[in-house]
Structures are given as structure tokens and as C-alpha cells.
Image: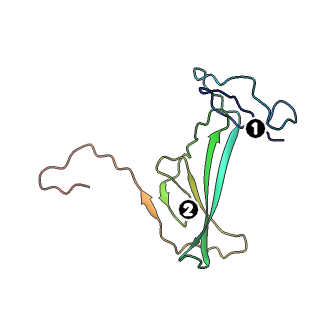
């Protein structure tokens, strides 16, 4: 059973975690969150938003995507998705610029494999330059 365990007070954040105190609902955490001790990130919360993509308001659905965010249920620290390019694509997963939101194109199992591939997207690429452009040279 899931319940909301929280610590009250101006300097103590609320943390929703699976109940470890039995089958209580709205029970209170007894241990305060200490900002000087690293959180072990033992419990997590996630939000998944499924988007229906249309070409116009009220038009037929041409694609779906799922946006996923994960955070520690105790300290609230957001988790970053590793190894995924930043941007938005109907063909492959991408992440937000800060890497805290995974954007995944999805389709119903009964849909054709090319469902949703005709929509536009964008990509973000970080380019490191070791020299600055000289006069007359075109910057990147």
C-alpha cells in the first residue's frame, strides 16, 4: 500500500514514499530529512505524460509520445537520462536540454511500424570549439 509520509516544518521538505510503517494511510515520517547527509535514493516517484499529437485542434491523432520524469521520493532530486540526444524526434527517444525529461515516441501495438514518423522534430548538438574565428572566417 502506498501512503504519504511527510515531515512538517518550514525547513523539512515533504516526501511521498511507500509506507514502511504498516498499512497506514497518511502516516507521518518519524525521521527528519538531514541536508548534511547524502540521500541514498531508495524510493522513487515518476510522472509519465502520454501526448496525442494532431495536425490541428480536434483533428485525428497522427502520433503519440510519452514524456517521463523520475525523482527521488525522499529528497526530490531529479534524475537525468544518460546517453540520449537532446531534442524531439518522432523516430527515436530524446531528452530535454537539462536531461531530466525523456521524450519517447510510442505507437499502439496494432499500428503500422511507420505510424507517427511523418511529424517534424528538432535536435540539439553541443559543439566545443578550441579556437575563435579569425577576421573573415565564418563562425559556426
**Where does the image place residue 32, in percent across and percent down from the top left?**
68, 23
Foreground residue among 77 and 134: 77
Q: Which mark is residue 4?
A: 1
Image quarter where the N terminus lies is top right
Q: Is residue 87 above or below residue 31?
A: below
Q: Residues within 10 Å of mark 1 (few under 14, many from 20)?
A: some
**Where does the image place residue 23, in percent across and percent down from the top left?**
88, 36
Q: Residues within 10 Å of mark 2 (few under 14, many from 20)?
A: few
Q: Is residue 24 above or below residue 111?
A: above
Q: Which mark is residue 92?
A: 2
Confirm or deny contact between disc 1 and disc 2 (CB under 8 A).
no
Question: Closer to us: mark 1 or mark 2?
Answer: 1
Q: Which mark is residue 99?
A: none
Residue at (61%, 79%) from the top-left corner? 60
**Where does the image place residue 83, in percent across and percent down from the top left?**
53, 48
Callout 1: helix, strand or loop?
loop
Q: Which badge, 1 or 2, comes first in the chain's sequence?
A: 1
| Relative side of 103 to 43, left or right | left
Callout 2: helix, strand or loop?
loop
Total labels: the figure holds 2
Foreground residue among 31 and 93: 31
**Where does the image place residue 21, in percent across and percent down from the top left?**
83, 30
Q: Residue furthest left?
A: 135
Residue at (69%, 40%) from the top-left corner? 44
Amino acid at each position: 500500500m502506498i501512503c504519504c509520509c511527510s515531515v512538517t516544518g518550514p525547513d523539512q521538505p515533504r516526501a511521498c514514499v511507500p509506507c514502511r510503517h504498516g498499512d497506514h494511510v497518511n502516516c507521518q515520517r518519524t525521521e527528519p530529512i538531514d541536508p548534511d547527509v547524502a540521500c541514498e535514493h531508495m524510493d522513487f516517484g515518476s510522472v509519465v505524460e502520454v501526448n496525442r499529437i494532431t495536425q490541428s485542434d480536434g483533428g485525428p491523432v497522427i502520433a503519440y509520445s510519452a514524456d517521463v520524469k523520475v525523482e527521488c521520493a525522499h529528497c526530490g532530486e531529479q534524475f537525468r537520462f544518460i546517453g540520449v540526444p537532446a531534442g524531439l524526434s518522432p523516430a527515436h527517444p530524446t531528452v530535454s536540454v537539462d536531461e531530466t525529461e525523456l521524450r519517447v515516441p510510442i505507437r499502439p501495438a496494432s499500428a503500422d511500424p511507420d505510424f507517427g514518423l511523418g511529424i517534424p522534430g528538432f535536435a540539439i548538438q553541443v559543439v566545443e570549439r578550441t579556437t575563435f574565428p579569425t577576421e573573415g572566417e565564418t563562425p559556426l
